[in-house]
Amino acid sequence: MQVTRTFSGASWESKVGYCRSIRVGNHIYISGTAPVDTAGGVFAAGNAYAQAKRCFEIILTALQDLGADQSHVVRTRMFVTDISRWAEFGQAHQEFFGANPPASTMVEVKSLVDSEMLIEVEVDAICPE
């Protein structure tokens, strides 16, 4: 079975020992994706919708690097620091997936790696054989 890993170049990958995404056969797993800007800083501090949207933009790039897109996603996991803002996170999720909604979980966590981050998203996808 073929295994393909992708890396974004973020320093966290080598420090922690993980890849951005991995494709095993026709399955794709995207690591927890935080709302970072191109310089590695937190994107849109305090804005739940914008942070969620940024996570999905980063995820789309990872999917495309492995020959997939959001229509192949079968499951998402959203880790949020304030569940009362579920509608803002959910709006970005709905806009990204549109007519192809995956199974999804949203849970509140105490904090993420940076206190200004409001969301982190994991994605699993399955591509045609």
Image: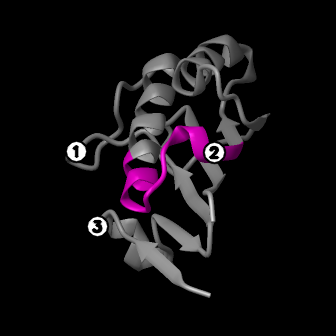
Which label was assigned to residue 73? Answer: 2
Left or right of 23 on screen, residue 40? left
Q: Nearer the viewer, residue 46 or 53?
A: 53
Left or right of 67 on screen, residue 43? left
What residue occupies the far bottom of the structure in this picture? Answer: 1
Answer whether residue 80 is visible to the viewer in this image.
yes
Which quarter of the rendered picture does the N terminus lie within? Answer: bottom right
Q: Where does the magenta region start and end?
A: 61-75
Q: CA distance from mark 1 to mark 3?
A: 11 Å
Number of residues whose C-alpha sits closer than 10 Å to that of mark 3, classed few (under 14), some (14–19) or many (20 or more)? few
What residue occupies the far left of the structure in this picture? Answer: 39
Which label was assigned to residue 9? Answer: 3
Q: Are marks 2 and 3 in contact (CB under 8 Å)?
A: no
Question: Is 73 part of what is drawn in magenta?
Answer: yes
Which label was assigned to residue 38? Answer: 1
Establish if 26 lies above or below 123. Answer: below
Establish if 28 lies above or below 45. Answer: below
Q: Position of residue 18 (x, y in %)?
A: 50, 75
Q: Hey, what amino acid is under mark 2?
A: Val
Question: Which tag, 2 or 3, sits closer to the chain's start?
Answer: 3
Q: Position of residue 129 (x, y in %)?
A: 63, 65
Question: Which tag, 1 or 2, sits closer to the chain's start?
Answer: 1
Q: Hey, what amino acid is under mark 1?
A: Thr
